[in-house]
Image (cartoon, coloured by chain):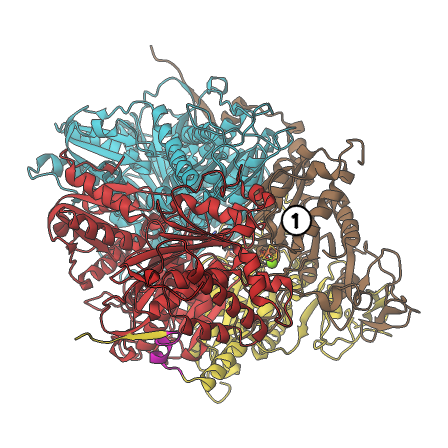
Chain colours: A red, B cyan, C brown, D yellow
Amino acid sequence: MSGSSPSRAPRDIDHAVVRFAGDSGDGMQLTGTEFTREAAFQGNDLATFPDYPAEIRAPAGTTAGVSGYQIQFAAHEVYSAGDQPDTLVAMNPAALKVHLADLKKGGLLVLNEASFQPADLTRAGWKSNPLTDHSLDGYRLIQVDFDKLVTHACEGLPGLGAKDVQRTKNFFALGLVFWLYSRDTARQEKAIHERFAKKPEIGEANLRAFKAGYFYGETTEAADAPWHIAPARLSPGTYRNVMGSTALALGLVAAAQKSGLRLFFGSYPITPASDILHELAKHRQFGVTTFQAEDEIAAVTASIGAAFGGALGATASSGPGIALKTEALGLALMIELPLVVIDAQRGGPSTGLPTKTEQSDLFQAVYGRNGESPIPVLAARSPADCFEVAFEASRIAIEYRTPVILLSDGAIGNGTEPWKLPRADALPRIDPKLRTDPEGFQPYSRDPETLARPWAVPGTKGLEHRVGGLEKDSLTGNVSYDPLNHEKMTRTRAEKVNRIARTYPKLVPAGDPDGEVGVLSWGGTYGSVTQAVIDARASGIRVGHIHLRHIFPLPLDLPEVLSRYRRILLPELNLGQLRLHVRGQLGIETIGLNKIQGKPFHVAEVRSAIEALARSPGPVTHKELA
Amino acid sequence: MSGSSPSRAPRDIDHAVVRFAGDSGDGMQLTGTEFTREAAFQGNDLATFPDYPAEIRAPAGTTAGVSGYQIQFAAHEVYSAGDQPDTLVAMNPAALKVHLADLKKGGLLVLNEASFQPADLTRAGWKSNPLTDHSLDGYRLIQVDFDKLVTHACEGLPGLGAKDVQRTKNFFALGLVFWLYSRDTARQEKAIHERFAKKPEIGEANLRAFKAGYFYGETTEAADAPWHIAPARLSPGTYRNVMGSTALALGLVAAAQKSGLRLFFGSYPITPASDILHELAKHRQFGVTTFQAEDEIAAVTASIGAAFGGALGATASSGPGIALKTEALGLALMIELPLVVIDAQRGGPSTGLPTKTEQSDLFQAVYGRNGESPIPVLAARSPADCFEVAFEASRIAIEYRTPVILLSDGAIGNGTEPWKLPRADALPRIDPKLRTDPEGFQPYSRDPETLARPWAVPGTKGLEHRVGGLEKDSLTGNVSYDPLNHEKMTRTRAEKVNRIARTYPKLVPAGDPDGEVGVLSWGGTYGSVTQAVIDARASGIRVGHIHLRHIFPLPLDLPEVLSRYRRILLPELNLGQLRLHVRGQLGIETIGLNKIQGKPFHVAEVRSAIEALARSPGPVTHKELA
Amino acid sequence: MTGKLNLAKKDFVSDQEVRWCPGCADFAILSTVQKVMPELDVPRENIVFVSGIGCSSRFPYYMNTYGMHGIHGRAPAIATGLKMARPELTVFVVTGDGDGLSIGGNHLIHALRRNIDLKILLFDNRIYGLTKGQASPTSELGKRTKSSPYGTVDRPFNPLTIALGAGATFVARSVATDTAHLATVLRRAAQHKGAAFVQIWQNCPVFNDGAFDSWAERDVRDEALIKLEHGKPLLFGKAKDKALRTGAGFSLEVGGTDGAVVHDEMREDLALSMALAALEPPMPQPMGVLRAVSRPTVDALAREQEEEAARKQAPDLEGLLRSGDTWTVEAQA
Amino acid sequence: MTGKLNLAKKDFVSDQEVRWCPGCADFAILSTVQKVMPELDVPRENIVFVSGIGCSSRFPYYMNTYGMHGIHGRAPAIATGLKMARPELTVFVVTGDGDGLSIGGNHLIHALRRNIDLKILLFDNRIYGLTKGQASPTSELGKRTKSSPYGTVDRPFNPLTIALGAGATFVARSVATDTAHLATVLRRAAQHKGAAFVQIWQNCPVFNDGAFDSWAERDVRDEALIKLEHGKPLLFGKAKDKALRTGAGFSLEVGGTDGAVVHDEMREDLALSMALAALEPPMPQPMGVLRAVSRPTVDALAREQEEEAARKQAPDLEGLLRSGDTWTVEAQA
Ligand SMILES: Cc1ncc(C[n+]2csc(CCOP(=O)(O)OP(=O)(O)O)c2C)c(N)n1
Ligand SMILES: Cc1ncc(C[n+]2csc(CCOP(=O)(O)OP(=O)(O)O)c2C)c(N)n1
Ligand code: SF4
Ligand code: SF4
Ligand SMILES: [Mg+2]
Ligand SMILES: [Mg+2]
């Protein structure tokens, strides 16, 4: 077998979806990340979707322990990690069991033959061997004995046990997929060296496995590979591939820096929010204090204490932890101090599906508190968008002296995409307008425009005052049980939050500005909906896409914009929470597309819904698409 | 001055509103309660509204420390404690300061002259003396030196200090008001004896003060008193004057008894929910375990543990405490066990106005949880209604294996009204259908009608199983991460709760079954709205009243019933929570009447709104009445 | 097989696949608990395992008894409600150092204070396992974890002093690697009437491997640990040649075996148990039962009040409804 | 007037009317705190009082400093955030036996474990005042209250053993009726660098009148209490003729003054402080400072890490955004 023959010269394709799947111990997340970095360097646009099991390491070889990582990369703009993979790498029978159904018909399947022993098959729940029982008919197969090949590759390497050698299998798979998509190996080889700099013998073994995989590709006849995907025409600038959780953290740091405040982040670990804490904990030099509290209540109340001290207070959790914070959010809105609360949503209710994604905390965010307690709610739409939304949430919190809830989710937080980096000095300054002048100071006087109250921080002479959760006098802030004062304050707090909507930019639908169907979306469905609208327009439907960053208060121009479409489709990963919210707030009828499976929408699911609505002649009713 | 002259024979009137107001140390709640008992014995229908200060005992003589108690009693049916008092007893200048504005023009004011010393006036915030500065023009005045008269009355009584004597002033006031409304003194005298049986000298002093007050009435020329209010034509039966909190407790006990279950009530004290705990703690012999937990989270989770053990689990709190319980409610709905959660609403948000009433926890009850977490929500409308609603909430919880939220509020919980006692043996039995048969047992199989799962209790051989907050397999209840199973379970939990609406009785509007205006109400506004609708109909308006006991799911016939009225008025003690809920759930437009002052509606406020709507010709819009 | 019921270890193995990482010390604890259970001679259906959230809190799924996998930190409260409602059940709580001492610390100390009859097993791996490796309240000062890349700044709890300080009537420590010792301690805890608190050192090979090696490993443990035996002098060392003695100014010091303090689990005052509990390296750390005193349990006291109340006044719903001042309105002609 | 700042008691009196019941011991504590404040010589604007909810938690309104009346039980957590964000401030926490030991117990023990530099004053009236008289975690066993008409069934906490068990570096007790002693203890707490825990017995004349009379009243207290003085033998009694001595099997016993144990607040091990803390009637109960040891505070350590990080790498937002693998897309022709 010689070098690549002319018949094997890469074929140009414009995008691909690859999924790596294996045991949680198999290093699939690392493999995916490495592949992603190279795609980014090659200038592809891309989006990723990691899919962890709930167990740290469920028994090896069981379906419970399967970990997956999907990437879509393309020569054009990419909005989601893709529906069905074109290529599925399955490191063992359990991974095959879990993911096979998703593979595109005719797609490429890369399997480790060695792992299909009877015991493995039983552990994975296969009744018979899929390699021989025609389960795989209709797919293209690359079936290799990974175990043997990595053993060969590492032969003669000193200081390595058999276990170490077998641990390199993921790099074998990576090499093979590099070849399939004709990726540049030089950068990756360097990266392997660097990653294992402290354990050079392990580095060398992985390198050899990686090369063995690559060479295996070159020598195999399977498939019509290799393919080539040209760089996307991204807008000029410097990029970085960013995880949503990282971008959230950086957005908070940037907002603190641009407002000249300390950042205090009180948090308690919970999937999928913990990574925000991990990221922020690294950046102490920015005046960032991270505090791993004893629980979520301590986390949020410590952040409130810090805000009283003049810091930008922030906290993050997921649904169950946010539930615990709700009492304290009432305090924050009563004492009117800046606080950013990130809810990284996951499958609910209760412990639910902790490692899966969902959009089912909207009700909790908007309505989930005792008393009349309006809190602005924003939602991030994608990993890179997290930066901007965190910055915007901080701005609102600081300028309006209010807690703000930012909804993210598991898919956004763990997902990645190329982020065109803003220039730090081009980011807008946020003026915290700290009060220092004792002259005429009243703790609850208000800015006539924003209705914000003065932020007077301990250490400032002459502004000593007391705040608390009892209703306060509308000027002095002293405790007040006066009935009319309570009505006034309740309405003022509501009005203050409503005024935030005045600062929103105009809503501009993507796609058609009016037409048959308007698709209204929020949060992480952005990607699938964007692509679905592009596809549907390509097939001749007049459809626009309105994506909400601001969930509460809703944009003032939303009713007008929605009225331009004959009917409104509202896809959500829940049973219709924004649908009810929009109807309740605005009296607007929409049609829901709802999925509650712990997974993002497929583009195709949204597209068919658009098509169905564009076709259907019936009257507009408020319902869920059957 | 001789005995009563003919000119002073009691005049018949058909109802009266009396308010007692004084320092928190003055015993106004006791005075009110005593007067109420006598009104009940005399066969009047009645309703009461106690109004506590937030402080235990604020500095004597300040407005912060004023405590009030209002009663409406009548020869006809009574639905609220009344808008403006006909008679106001003000024990000191602070009480006068706080309550004067409420007194009906021309109403009767009973004052303790002795308490209007300059220092008292200053402490109460009077700039000048209201007794002399014409502040009281337009009211009829009975101005007496209570201090002197009780001193005289108690003269010669052994074993009494001056302080003890002064403490009898409230009984003086009581005696005077007894005379004003020509109440029977015999029963009251006996009651005083019994109450102070352990301290007869104090009893004697109070008795003398009481009599002195009564006689003072006889000898004074003021007002056109005495009045007489005949018994109301109540439906035959045995009655008891009951506080809302007591009725809630008894409803729980009755439901447990009728289902043959133990009652486990885990709670943490908070105003105005604590009295439920206090009441239940007395009834140990009914297999009632009360558990004062370390916090609200322990309270609810202990109740969940008890439910797992086969008890009817229950807990109660107010807004801030319910907020803390929300995470645990997710667990309860996931493991599908019976749990009754009482939210005694108070002024919010945060600590808010703890001793005041409000209806602002509807959002929290219906929407305030992470994930898709439907929980049925009921609301009590009055003190006596609490019994039925608690019984009904328990029935739903047991039959559907679900947490149920019951909304009460401060005014209902502390208020009283005559309760026509049900016969214990006539109360319906609740069948908990405990599972005992191991044959074919599946922890998450479902009753085809209710979708309830089996309740299999530890101690039952062969039914050993594990439950938890992770998503569960739709049959075995084992942990399941399967995407389609999650969708199925999410929809099943929603459907189960929706089916509860099938068991509701038909909605029957009070007043006109169709017409100009339909008034939709829920919870504690029931009384004011009922009276307002009666009054409005009397003035010729065609108006009906639809009161909701079931807040979620909403009654299936609600849209049809509402459609019979030209416009719907929705009065609420919040900024429009049911309004948004009804619009969001049903797309129905209503017009809000909103008050957020920690106080119930006046009948007149509701009546004017009905009149305004009946008159206004404009189109129906979803808004708040300006 | 043991006891009248003839139960065996396998009777306590559920049909659920055990999902811990390979090498996790939780396996050893599970197996030891399953081995000890038959000895209690309690019917399976009368046993309940309640847990919070964490790797350790998966425990109930693997026990073929009744069980509840609760929410994070709340297991002692859930179990308290269960036990008060059903005092006849045998209730175990399984929790972790995060679950039991971080978010759930308050419920834990209140359960101990109340002396509710629960057996509380705290699997202490000094790390958050399930959420992948953050510091826990028992992580040593300066520990670098995902959430503390510069090292933790907060000093750890000593679970034993917390438990004793809260008034626990039974406090013990064992380690997953010494299953024989663990079995003994579990047996003692199960026999105790009241709240029994057992700290179990448990290695997490994935996120905190070797956390206990420096003292709990076979080759060092004789010198680094002191096994407590009721009524016996406090000796340790391979040759049992070292002892704890009363030192200057009311303290425990290490010395020769003469004058060794004699261990007494049943002492009412806390002085000795607390002094032992507080020992940390380089002093030998106590293993075994530090305290075991007898006090009425809250579940029993509450049930007694109830029975007493019922004796005084039989439950009568009709009477209850009609209590207080009532009056009757007659049907009118 | 005291100190360089020439502050006086009246400078610490706010304009808010004090709203406790007549006769409430909270007045005495307030007055004592206001009296001690000037001695600290800290500018008013650098002082913050943080509280939870309860009668006692009204405290901040009455202090003319910065203050926050928080939510029930969370004051230690609020104050922790404040102090970590602003280590230069002097932060007091005021809490009650319900606020601090029931709902807030966990935050309290974690604040103590972390050694965050807060002065935590627990007003212990052994009852829930604000909610009108339910049992608290320090109410004595069998107490009849609104929530326990048959008497409580749960044994109370000893706040001192809890605090010591949690690792508190400063633990003390005083009583509102002995304001001179209280002032001394408050001064000591304020001077301590780290988490200072002070239990203050406080009579609630409305709901729990006389709770401490049997030992804290003037006529009995010399016999029933033992005032601790660092470096002095542990003597008590009117004539100082009784002492605490080392008893059999490592315990404290009452005896004559010879061989009295000498009090040492600064002992690293817990044996003595814990043995003292655990003393309950009929043994004399300790008053004063049980423990005062020096440890780095979490606020200082965190701030050091930050400064260290900034020294190593100056904060550079542009650099932060651009960290990791970046690539550049050129404008296309
Ligand atoms: C309310 C809430 N907060 C946070 C979490 C996330 N969480 C799950 S387990 C855990 C800590 C586990 O640590 P530990 O108790 O030590 O158990 P281990 O996994 O080490 O056995 C955390 C923080 C959660 N599930 N719920
Ligand atoms: C979340 C929450 N739960 C309950 C309450 C009600 N509550 C207010 S103060 C208090 C207890 C007060 O007792 P303690 O801390 O001893 O203070 P004291 O009034 O005795 O000074 C309770 C239960 C509340 N405000 N918030
Ligand atoms: S993460 Fe650690 S504690 Fe959790 S299962 Fe794995 S090894 Fe055990
Ligand atoms: S209730 Fe008790 S603690 Fe509260 S203010 Fe009154 S006397 Fe003081
Ligand atoms: Mg752990
Ligand atoms: Mg108290």
Q: Which residue is mark 1?
A: C114
Residue neighbourhood size for the residue with mark 1, other residues' Cα within 10 Å, grouped as few (<14), some (14–19), many (≥20):
many
Q: Is residue C294 visible?
A: no
Say which quarter of the image contains residue B132.
bottom left
Amino acid identity at mark 1: Arg
Placement of B385 over or under A596, stated as above or below: above
Placement of A608 over or under D231, stated as above or below: above
Placement of D304 over or under A557, stated as above or below: below
Q: Which residues are magenta?
A: D315-325
Q: Chain of mark 1?
A: C
Which percent across, then down, holds residue B35?
Answer: 40, 35
Q: As rendered, which of A384 and B289 lies closer to the eye?
A: A384
Image point 27% across, 34% down: which residue? A626
Which percent across, then down, holds residue C202?
Answer: 67, 58
Q: Is residue B173 left or right of residue A583?
A: right
Q: As rendered, which of B418 and A453 lies closer to the eye?
A: A453
